[in-house]
Amino acid sequence: MIPRKFAPVLFAFILSGLMSFVVSGISTARVTGFAAGFAGLWMSAWLMALLVAFPLVLFVAPLARRAVEKLTY
C-alpha cells in the first residue's frame, strides 16, 4: 500500500497513464492503421506521451481545480 499523502501524485499518474494510452493508441492507429508492428509503435508512442503527460498533469491540476472553483457555485 502507498501512504495516503501520495494520493494526488498517484491519481495524476493513473490519469495521465490512461489518457495517454488511449490517445496514443488512437493517433497511432490513424497514422499506421493496424499494420504489422502496430503494438510496438503504440507502446513507443505511449511511453513518450506518458513522459510528457504525467509532469503536465502534476503542473496543470492545481490550475484546473482553481478554474473549477471559480466556474461553479
Image (spheres, rainbow, N blue to C red):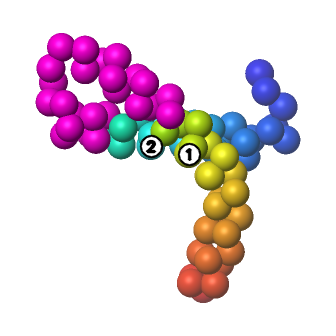
In the rendered structure, the answer to whether residue 54 lies left or right of residue 38 reads: right
Where disc 2 sits, the SS reads helix
In the rendered structure, the answer to whether residue 1 lies left or right of residue 12 reads: right
Name the residue rendered at 67%, 69% in the picture. 63
- 70 is within the stretch colored magenta: no
Give residue 70's position: percent from left, percent from top: 63, 84
First reached walking from the N terminus: tag 2 or tag 1:
2
The span shown in magenta is 25-48
Quadrant for residue 40, please give it.
top left
Instruction: Mark 2 and mark 1 in contact? Answer it, CB < 8 Å.
Output: yes
Where disc 1 sits, the SS reads helix
The residue where tag 2 is placed is 19
Quadrant for residue 28, please give it.
top left
- 42 is within the stretch colored magenta: yes
Dot 2 crowding, Cα within 10 Å, few <14, some 14–19, many 20+: some
Name the residue rendered at 44%, 31% in the picture. 46
Kindly identify the amino acid type of the residue bearing the numbered disc 1: Ala
Name the residue rendered at 49%, 39% in the picture. 49
The residue where tag 1 is placed is 53
Kindly identify the amino acid type of the residue bearing the numbered disc 2: Met
From this view, report whether residue 68 is shown above or below residue 16: below
